Image: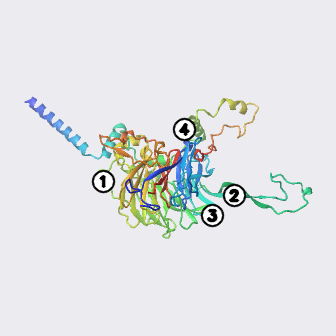
Amino acid sequence: MSENRELEVQAEETGEEKQDTQEKGAMSPEKAEEIKLKAKYPVLGLRPGGSEFLMKRLQKGKYFDSGDYNMAKAKMKNKQPPSSGADKNLVTGDHIPTPEDLPQRKSSLVASKLAG
Amino acid sequence: MAGPGGGGGGGGNDLQWCFSQVKGAVDEDVAEADIISTVEFNYSGDLLATGDKGGRVVIFQREQEVGNEFEFSGTKKLIYFCQSKSRPHHGGGEYNVYSTFQSHEPEFDYLKSLEIEEKINKIRWLPQQNAAHFLLSTNDKTIKLWKISERDKRAEGYNLKEEDGRFRDPVRITTLRVPVLKPMDLMVEASPRRIFANAHTYHINSISVNSDYETYLSSDDLRINLWHLEITDRSFNIVDVKPANMEELTEVITAAECHPHQCNVFAYSSSKGTIRLCDMRAGALCDKHSKFFEEPEDPSSRSFFSEIISSISDVKFSHNGRYMMTRDYLSVKVWDVNMETRPVETYQVHEYLRSKLCSLYENDCIFDKFECCWNGLDSAIMTGSYNNFFRMFDRNTKRDITLEASRESSKPRAILKPRKVCTGGKRKKDEISVDSLDFNKKILHTAWHPKENIIAVAATNHLYIFQDKVN
């Protein structure tokens, strides 16, 4: 009796599973992709209040302060950190630094390669 | 079908596209600054301007000569050709560098701790009214009016100065002479004539010259301003969608354009896939639209991605002003200006990406902003895709074609072979599977000559120019 019951339950479960896969098959590719994404990032879309994409978009290029900005630039250009060795000799000590002495952000005054 | 400005359908007796020129360095390393960010023909099509991430503008001019030469420049690896004399005059003529200048420099706003990129977002030409050429170029914050003029004569024989500029000793000057104009090598000079700054809190996405040739509009994420070309210290705010409480922000402005003939009408698109047409005669502030275009959405098909992929990345009026074209992530839609309920035509650009949205979201490609353009007759439209593919749709024949901008097809007069992406299991020869597409090779910017079948396609740091093969 109990065996039969178990078999019945099992049959029900597999039946439901079959229904699930059937539903997934009929689902739009978009929905399937959404499920994939939610599986990877369950927290997505749960934050309230306004679209986070829009906020991120409006905030583009924002730094905490100019120091934060310069550190970020330095990280991008590892070859030219803000306190490079060669410049230290010129800038510190007796020499009073002027804007010209400070390492410049690489300027794009190099001509465009489209211009040959 | 001969004649300029015809449609862009595929094979057979239809238009066929040939490689004409490619600009840019051959080396594999792509410097960030070299990435082309905008491409624009001027009103006659004789000038082609590009802007890049490094804030530089390069202007190419079409050669008027029609000759028999075929030249190969070994050092620069630039292959170009001229057409034979027997061809009709309106064809041929390659584009060569006319002028190049640094338009914008990188800035840092210390007050707001905001980096201001020098990347040129848009270039728009003004119609030519005298010998000089004028264009507007903009980065995220500042719009500049540039004057590009030619100098081919120089005055010689000044009384007070030597030819090298040194002042002459006044005691030695015994006669008076009139300076004469002597020819000199052509010099093309670019100078900034107006700087329109400090009017945008958010990032400028569009500029558009009005048909009155006196005003232009600039739009950022939340506001649209109207400027007079002569006045830099004032601009009128005509659209403001900033909510009182930023937490309530649900929609931003993505693009804006003036109507090509009606100087009181402009349109702007949103991140929710809607377009609003506004009439400046209705009021000083055009927050209330005159027309609202939105395609009804099937609620059952809604997903997490729906809003993101419906965001319009570009809106362009047709030359005749009767239609608008919008580009969203997967499709291009043509709207009749008189019908707000739904687009009259929809073209799928790369529908096979719908089943890849998850990974496209993860690598941020889903936020790529593709542009679109009309041909001169409004009979065909073009837009870019990935893997350096670009698509053309003929509105009359309903045929479409996929072409590729690549070094492999960069042989002179080479007819571009149509490309095909295979979605199913069985991949035919010459087809490319969706998973093999290079998503770093995106064609976001394309331009079509206003009168002829010449197109400019920006593939990252290279500019390709293709022409039709007149049979």
Could you tell me how far apart the alpha carbons at marks 4 and 3 are, in whole angstroms?
43 Å
Query: Which is closer to the viewer, label 1 or label 4?
Result: 4
Tag 2: amino acid: Arg
Judging by the rendered image, the residue that carries numbered circle 3 is B230
Please check whether the numbered discs 2 and 1 fall on a single chain: yes
Tag 1: amino acid: Pro
Q: Nearer the viewer, residue B378 or A4?
A: B378
Q: Quadrant of residue B341?
A: bottom left
| B313 lies left or right of B26 | left
Most extreme residue toward the left, as rendered? A1
* Residue at screen point 58% across, 38% down: A73
Residue B243 visible in the snapshot: no
Task: Please tell me whether mark 3 sits on a helix, a strand or a loop.
Answer: loop
Parent chain of label 1: B
Label count reads 4
Q: In which quadrant is the C terminus of chain B drawn?
A: bottom left
Task: Please tell me whether mark 1 sits on a helix, a strand or a loop.
Answer: helix
Residue B135 visible in the snapshot: yes
Judging by the rendered image, the residue that carries numbered circle 4 is B27
Query: From what the image shows, is residue B446 above or below residue B423?
Result: below
| A110 lies left or right of A10 | right
First in sequence: mark 4 vs mark 2: 4
Task: Please tell me whether mark 2 sits on a helix, a strand or a loop.
Answer: strand
Judging by the rendered image, the residue that carries numbered circle 1 is B299
Judging by the rendered image, the residue that carries numbered circle 2 is B151
Could you tell me how far apart the alpha carbons at marks 1 and 4 are, in whole angstroms?
49 Å
Please check whether the numbered discs 4 and 2 fall on a single chain: yes
Q: Position of residue B159 (x, y in %)?
A: 84, 59
